[in-house]
Image (tube, rainbow, N blue to C red):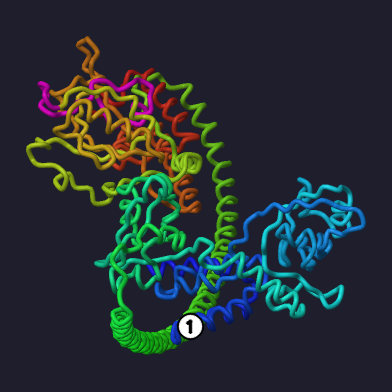
Amino acid sequence: MEQQLAKEFNEEVHALIDDLSEREALFQSLREYQHSLDLKQLMEDLRNLVNTPGKMSIYEALRPLIPVKHQLDYERMLPPAVYGKIRVIRLKRRANESLGFAVRGGLEHGIGVYVSHVDPESQAYHQGLRVGDQIVRVNGFTIEQAIHDEVLNLLKAKSQIVLKVRYIGMLPSKDRGDDFVRWQFVDRLDSGKALQHVLEDAYARTYLLDQRDVKLFIHIPVGMGLGCSICSGPPEHPGIFIQSIKQGSLAEEAGLEVGDQIINVNGTSFFGISHGEAVVALKGSRQLEFIIRKGAGADLFRPNSPVLSTEELRERERLLEMKEMAIQREREKIERKEREHKLLETERKRETMERKLREKEARHQDAISRLKQQEQETKKEAEERKKTEEQAKRDQEEKEEEILQTKQEHEESMTKMQEELLTLQEREKQQKERLKEQLTQASSFKLQKPVLMSPASSKTSSQEKTGTPYFDDDAISETDFDPERYFTHEEIEGRQVILLKIRRNGLRDLSFEGGTGTALRGKIIVTHVMEGGIVHMQGGIHKGDQLMMVDGHSLVDVSMDEAMRLVDEAADRVGVHAQLVVAKAGPKEYEDEVMRSGSNSTSEYRQVECYMLDVHVSAQEKAILLLFGFVKTHLSLIYFLSSPWSLMLHLVLQISTKQQPSKNFCFFDTLLISLFLYCTNLTIFQFGF
């Protein structure tokens, strides 16, 4: 609690005193009082420091910090201005007679108006006006914002003057017009013996302790009581009075006496309350702020016992003096121990602070060392990073030079190959014209049209349009595809299992059925391939084939819904092709659409399947392959015209090697061959076989 009171006082001082030196002087005076307990010296210091009316509230803020034994003396030594209340002074102007007082101040000086002089025999003096009073109102008008001349004119305007004043006990003064306003207490002014006598007489008659209420602050420690009893007065003298005082109690130490009337406790008025309510108010808090009217009920507690003899009185006085001396010695002993304890505590705190400062300094030095080390490490890392970046830059430049050189060589090679290609195309054109003339003379043959796929150049173009192809984490390598790595012998069932690359949008050309819970026992069987679609044109998948895997996801022993979901996801992925693993159906397990004719014809139809190669080659290699395929195809046609056996051998070779014809010429040439074979009713094949 004492710390809280000290904190509140410190805040009040900082709010009222702006000057740092004045605040330090005030705190120094309080420290000296704490060691010496010299209240008189403290009050003198306060009168020097609290030198303006605005600082008077410091006295009230300091009251809770004054020990209980000095509370009454502190109250007695307070400047009268602390209790300055509004008083009303009524004056009447008479002919050839002044009002008998003078004022100073005004708004032009930044202060109010104060009474600086009062004639002892004047009307104003007899009405109670005193030096140090502040004039608040004149005939009902507030003069806080009035200059000095306006106040004088207001005082002279009417014969009846009503003043409202408040005693401040201080007067403003200036040595020169441009000086700051200084304040002086009235009792320190050198006004002569007559004025001093008047002031002392006024002080004695107005502010004597027995003629006014006193304010006391008592803090009751835990485990102790106030040490007094109270009672209610009779009807003719109502109120709450102190009935008895316990010796050595806080009440006795604070200067309370039997017969003192309690006016107020912690803001609660004791007028018109019962004895029980008064007891509750006194016991409701350990910090009690009293307003006591000294001796107001002394007549109620006069003893009715016979008058004691002189010797008995002397003996009682002697015993009381001895008791007081013993109490004083004990009190001094306790105070001395308290001071020693405080000194030891202060020394201990000082040593603790020094130790903490040393530890803080050591931590500070450690932090500085760590910062320096980190700075060096950062600098070293920056140098290494710079070297690495320079080396990477040099490597990049060398790589760019190599790429540029390779590009130049590539362009030269492409130019040379384009020239050769133009020459070959011209020769091919001439051969084609001769072939057309020979085909027009031949009979027609009936042959199924081969299914053609897009060339590698078209595939590359599609990839560039659609973005980077999708490759699942479980994508199957075409070079080392082994069905037994992915499926059991029971799942393969001796069938041919092939890996195909199908354009993703072509997956929607397939219709299938089966799955778990059906008669097909977990198999996904192709029921229909859309005619003219991508899958139909590419070949490799027919009705009755089993879909085993799509994009690395198994389609064996899955439900129909799961199979549809996996196929749809594969069709929607980014990329050109999807990987599809198919188990080919045997001749008796599905309907052969090529051989189904409904007649007894002995002609057999063979399906020619062209599989698309997904080989990543350079532009020069693609041009060479294109030229090679073009020449080889037309040489085959020439052989065909000259010998049926050569034609059959060439066709079997193409089918077995699964080579892809040229897009520009293979389809046209194959069409001519088909027409030729159809017209001759496959005479050559029948003859050969």
**Which residue is painted at 60% across and 51% down in the image?**
419
Quadrant in which residue 566 is drawn: top left
**Which residue is painted at 39% across and 37% down in the image?**
639
**Which residue is painted at 34% across and 61% down in the image?**
286
Could you tell me if residue 504 is visible in this image? yes
| Amino acid type, mark 1 | Tyr
Q: Residues within 10 Å of mark 1 (few under 14, many from 20)?
A: some
Q: Position of residue 305 (x, y in %)?
A: 28, 65
Q: Viewer-proximal residue, 274 or 21?
A: 274
Bounds of the magenta segment: 516-542
What residue would you read off at disc 1? 33
Q: Viewer-proximal residue, 414 or 248?
A: 248
The quarter in which the C terminus is drawn is top left
Q: Is residue 87 above or below residue 351?
A: above
Q: Position of residue 39 (x, y in %)?
A: 49, 80
Q: Position of residue 410 (x, y in %)?
A: 55, 59
Residue 594 relative to residue 267: left or right: left
Asked whether 30 falls inside the magenta stretch, the response is no
Quadrant in which residue 646 is drawn: top left
Q: Is residue 73 above or below residue 403?
A: below
Q: Position of residue 554 (x, y in %)?
A: 20, 38
**Which residue is painted at 49% across and 85% down in the image?**
32
Considering the numbered disc 1 on the image, is that residue within a helix, a strand or a loop? helix
Q: Is residue 294 above or below residue 253?
A: above
Asked whether 518 falls inside the magenta stretch, the response is yes
Q: Viewer-proximal residue, 472 or 2?
A: 2
| Residue furthest top in the image | 599
Q: Viewer-proximal residue, 119 or 375?
A: 119
Residue 92 relative to residue 630: left or right: right
| Residue furthest right in the image | 96
